[in-house]
Image (cartoon, rainbow, N blue to C red):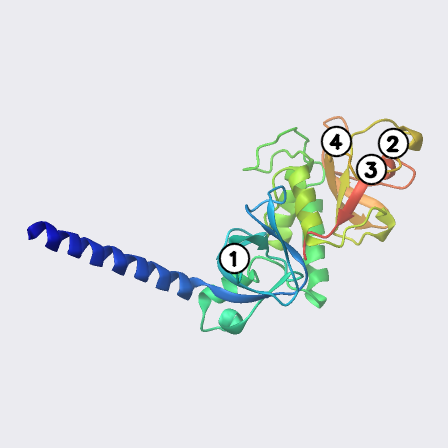
Amino acid sequence: MKKQLTALLLATTVTFSVGAFTAEQALAASDATIVSGVNFRKAPNTGSDTYGLLKAGEKVDILEKVNDYWYKVRDDQGRVGYISTSSKYVRADGSGGSSSNGSGSSNSGSTSKPSTGSSSSEVVNKVIAAGKKYLGTPYEFASDRSNTRTFDCSDFTRQAFKEGAGITLPSDSRGQASYVKSLGGTTTNWHNLKPGDLMFFMDYKGTKASAYPSNKSNQRISHVGIYLGDGKILHTYSKTSGGVRIDSIAGKHWEYRFVFGGSALK
C-alpha cells in the first residue's frame, strides 16, 4: 500500500512540474511575424544546418534572445531553432512592444541595436568617431579583446562598434563577415558602400590588379575595416604601418583585395 501511495505521489509531482514548466514557457514566449524569408537554423551560427526557409507572413514564438544576432524560436510545426534578430526578417507582435511587458522589448532587440531612420546616421557618426579616437594605437595580431592598448583588424572594428553603436560584433573578421552577410544588403563594389559600412578583404597577393582573381566570392576573408566615405578606410593591419590609420582605396591593393562590404547596423 505504501509503495502504491508513493508512486501516486511521485506521478502527481512530475505531472505538476511538467505543467508548470510549460506554462512558464508560454508566458515567456513572444509572438512574432516573419517579414521576409529567413534561414531557420538548428544552431545560432550562420554555418549550421537549417530546417529550411521561414517565409514572409509565417508566425513564430520567440523563446529567447540568445545574443544581439540570434533569436531562439518555435515555428508552427513545433520545431525549435534560430533566426536572425534583424528587423529586416522578423517583427515582434502583440505585447512585444508594450511598455507593460519588459521581456517583450528585450526580445525585439531594440535595446541592443541602433534604430533606423534619421538616428542611423547618428549611430554611424558615433562608430566612426569611436574608431578615430584610436588612431595610432599599435597593431598586435590576436590582440587581447579585454583592453584597448593594442588592436588587430577585427578587434579594432569590434571596439568601434561596441563603443559607438552598443553592439558586440564577432571577434574575428570571418565571423564579422558572416554576420554582415546574414543581414543582407551587401555589395562587391566598394563604390556602393556607405560611411560606417564594414569592408572585407582577401589575402594580400601584390600591388597589381592582375594578381587577384576577378571572382573573389570564394576567397577566405582575412581583413576588415570601416569605410569612411570618399574612398577612404579606417583600419589597422601591421606594426610597421603605424597601427590604426586611414588609407585610400582606389588604385591600391585594397581595391583589388576587396571581397564585399555592408552594414552591421541593420
Mark 2 belongs to which amino acid? Answer: Tyr
Residue that mark 4 sits on:
242
**Mark earlier in primary sequence (4, 1):** 1
| Residue 212 badge | 2
Q: Work out how far the residue at label 3 is from the one at label 4, CA to CA, in angstroms.
A: 28 Å
**Mark earlier in primary sequence (4, 2):** 2
Q: Tell me the quarter of the picture where residue 141 sits.
A: top right
Where 52 falls versus 34 (above or below)? above
Residue that mark 3 sits on:
216
- Which of 78/159 is in front? 78
Q: Quadrant of the C terminus?
A: bottom right
Q: Which residue is drawn at 41% across and 64% down?
A: 26
- Which of 55/63 is in front? 55
**Mark earlier in primary sequence (1, 3):** 1
- Count the labels in the image: 4
Q: Nearer the viewer, mark 3 or mark 4?
A: 3
Relative image position of residue 200 (x, y in whole percent): 76, 41
Relative image position of residue 107 (x, y in whole percent): 51, 61
The crowding category of the residue bearing disc 3, from other C-alpha atoms within 10 Å (few below 14, some 14 to 19, many at least 20), is: some
The crowding category of the residue bearing disc 2, from other C-alpha atoms within 10 Å (few below 14, some 14 to 19, many at least 20), is: some
Q: Work out how far the residue at label 2 is from the one at label 1, CA to CA, in angstroms.
A: 42 Å
Asked whether the residues under the numbered discs 2 and 3 touch, taking CB atoms below 8 Å apart as contact, a structural biologist would say yes
**Mark earlier in primary sequence (3, 4):** 3
Residue that mark 1 sits on:
73
Q: Which of marks 4 and 1 is in front?
A: 1
Q: Nearer the viewer, mark 1 or mark 3?
A: 1
Relative image position of residue 251 (x, y in whole percent): 92, 38
Q: Work out how far the residue at label 1 is from the one at label 3, CA to CA, in angstroms.
A: 34 Å
Relative image position of residue 232 (x, y in whole percent): 83, 45
Residue 198 appears anywhere in the view: yes
